[in-house]
């Protein structure tokens, strides 16, 4: 490998020096080594050492120490505001539940610690003076852009079924292939995901969805996705018989996912937006139709996301986007303002981005023109925002306080009045001017 030199940030170097100064071995390990070697900025720096947890704590008595997972041998040390996880070399015991080892044993061997890690690219350690420790050839796999289990894929997935999704997640975010024997085990052992908690599946799937390789990975491993989200299976191979579409529903869905900006809400909305199509299909001499599919998709999405134990905020927003994804836009400023008034500025932007992704995954013959129109709407919204156009209550030239001061009774009346004024301003019936609006609100009351 070319860039064998890794320069950890100063606090990480301090952590290594402190442990080594006390006579222990210490290395940076895992994701940070992988990312630094491929020229990406690591987002956190984990260390591994032969010091036992109480010895780690003692070494860092001058620092803030959080005893995160003492029984697993993990201590977090905060150096210059940077939290650094330091873990004692360990060997995992038996995995009776296919998820967590029943026991962990500390060891003096770094090689043994690296052996318990999931993939070769995640099983490298590095010390600025001692260089790279890479007994499982992670550097070669990194160069070859390959995700490969450390040891037998079958045994590693038996131990912890979550690794099946982790393999797909890393393949997606790094845009790597999964090695043949590992890929085979991903397919054949996917049922082990049944033992994994919904929250962990959600975390991995969300990262996978936001990766650059999401479309490719979810095409190759559709069967695994359907194991955790069976609601999506009917989309695969479902032909649309419709001139707007070149692809079956699942292929279209994955292309829409890939065309969305890599943000969890948008990518989940894209994944779920057409789940109702196989359930609403009708055909006549004009071709296939999916009347009312957005409402059905919304209910399927609700079930799927609830099964994932998705948090309320993401659930509500994804459902809103799925429900409204087919909203017909006539392209006028007035209509765009109405949408913003109804669902808010942020959701309106997301809806336009989802719409853009949706049309860019439709039939080639209309694609360019529809994407252009979607871009025009996004620019229009940007321009309205830049001009501080009145689209929400907070931009209205009167406030609830103004109405109260002018003698309007407190409570629902004020809210209703403000909403009517906003509607009138958006419809162009009233200018957004304080005196005019106040007068209109008060005369409405009589
Ligand atoms: P990132 O944080 O960028 O998502 P990472 O490689 O740091 O990637 P983490 O989930 O933070 O991934 O795990 C840190 C390291 O711990 C991994 O690099 C790997 O060596 C090991 N690891 C994490 N989860 C598992 C697991 N389920 N089985 C085996 N090893 C694991
Ligand atoms: Mg990490």
Image (cartoon, helix red, strand yellow):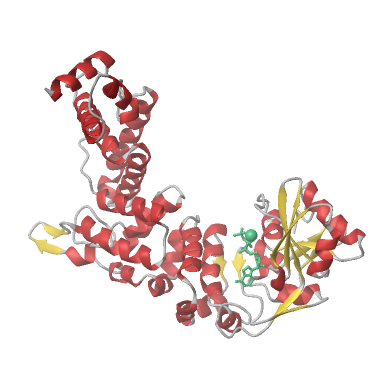
Q: Residue at x 43, y 73 (%)?
A: 224
Report x, y in % for residue 418: 24, 29
Residue 240: quadrant of the picture: bottom left
Q: Is residue 269 above or below residue 55?
A: above
Task: Specify the farthest residue to the top.
Answer: 435
Instruction: Residue at 35%, 36% (x, y): give it.
Output: 345
Q: In this figure, what is the number of numbered marks?
A: 0
Q: Quadrant of residue 239?
A: bottom left
Q: Position of residue 107 (x, y in %)?
A: 80, 77
Spot occupied by residue 340 in the image (x, y as percentages of width and height): 29, 36
Placement of the C terminus among the 4 image quadrants: top left
Give the residue at the far left of this rendering: 285
Left or right relative to 293: residue 191: right
Nearest the viewer among 71 and 95 is: 71
Say above or below: 123 vs 157: above
Q: Nearer the viewer, residue 160 or 260?
A: 160
* Visible residue check, residue 332: no
Quarter for ligand 1? Answer: bottom right
Q: Is residue 159 left or right of residue 330?
A: right
Examine the rendering and report whether any part of residue 308 can be seen: yes
Q: Residue at point 73% right, 78% down?
A: 91
In this view, the residue in front, 445 or 141, is 445
Looking at the rendered image, the quarter that the N terminus falls into is: bottom right
Residue 206 percent coordinates (x, y): 47, 59
Residue at image coords 29%, 53%? 322
User: In the image, 49: left or right of 415?
Assistant: right
């Amino acid at each position: 490998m070319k860039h064998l030199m890794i320069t950890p940030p100063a606090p990480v170097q301090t952590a290594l020096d402190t442990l080594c100064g006390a006579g222990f071995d210490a290395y940076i390990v895992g994701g940070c080594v992988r990312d630094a070697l491929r020229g990406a900025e690591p987002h956190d720096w984990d260390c591994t050492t032969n010091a036992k947890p109480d010895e780690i704590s003692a070494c860092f008595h001058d620092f803030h120490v959080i005893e995160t997972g003492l029984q697993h041998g993990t201590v977090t040390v905060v150096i210059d505001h940077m939290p650094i996880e330091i873990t004692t070399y360990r060997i995992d015991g038996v995995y009776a539940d296919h998820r967590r080892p029943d026991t962990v044993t500390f060891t003096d061997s770094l090689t043994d610690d690296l052996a318990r890690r999931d993939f070769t690219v995640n099983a490298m350690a590095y010390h600025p003076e001692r260089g790279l420790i890479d007994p499982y050839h992670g550097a070669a796999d990194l160069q070859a852009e390959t995700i490969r289990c450390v040891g037998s894929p079958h045994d590693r997935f038996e131990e912890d079924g979550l690794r099946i999704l982790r393999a797909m997640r890393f393949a997606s975010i790094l845009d790597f292939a999964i090695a043949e024997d590992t890929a085979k085990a991903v397919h054949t052992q996917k049922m082990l995901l049944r033992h994994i908690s919904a929250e962990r599946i959600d975390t991995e799937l969300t990262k996978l969805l936001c990766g650059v390789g999401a479309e490719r990975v979810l095409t190759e491993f559709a069967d695994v996705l359907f194991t955790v989200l069976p609601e999506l299976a009917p989309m695969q191979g479902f032909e649309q018989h419709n001139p707007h579409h070149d692809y079956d529903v699942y292929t279209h869905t994955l292309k829409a996912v890939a065309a969305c900006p890599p943000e969890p809400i948008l990518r989940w909305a894209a994944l779920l937006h057409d789940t109702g199509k196989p359930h609403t299909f009708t055909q006549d001499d004009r071709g296939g139709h999916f009347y009312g599919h957005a409402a059905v998709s919304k209910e399927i999405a609700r079930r799927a996301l609830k099964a994932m134990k998705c948090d309320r905020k993401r659930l509500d927003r994804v459902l809103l986007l799925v429900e409204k994804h087919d909203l017909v836009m006539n392209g006028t400023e007035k209509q765009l303002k109405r949408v913003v008034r109804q669902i808010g500025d942020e959701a309106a932007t997301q809806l336009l981005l989802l719409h853009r992704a949706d049309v860019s995954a439709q039939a080639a013959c209309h694609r360019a023109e529809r994407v252009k129109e979607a871009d025009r709407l996004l620019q229009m919204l940007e321009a309205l925002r830049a001009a501080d156009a009145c689209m929400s209550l907070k931009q209205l030239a009167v406030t609830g306080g103004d109405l109260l001061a002018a003698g309007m009774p407190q409570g629902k009346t004020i809210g209703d009045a403000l909403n009517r004024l906003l509607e009138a301003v958006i419809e162009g019936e009233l200018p957004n001017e304080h005196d005019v609006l106040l007068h209109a609100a008060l005369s409405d009351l009589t």
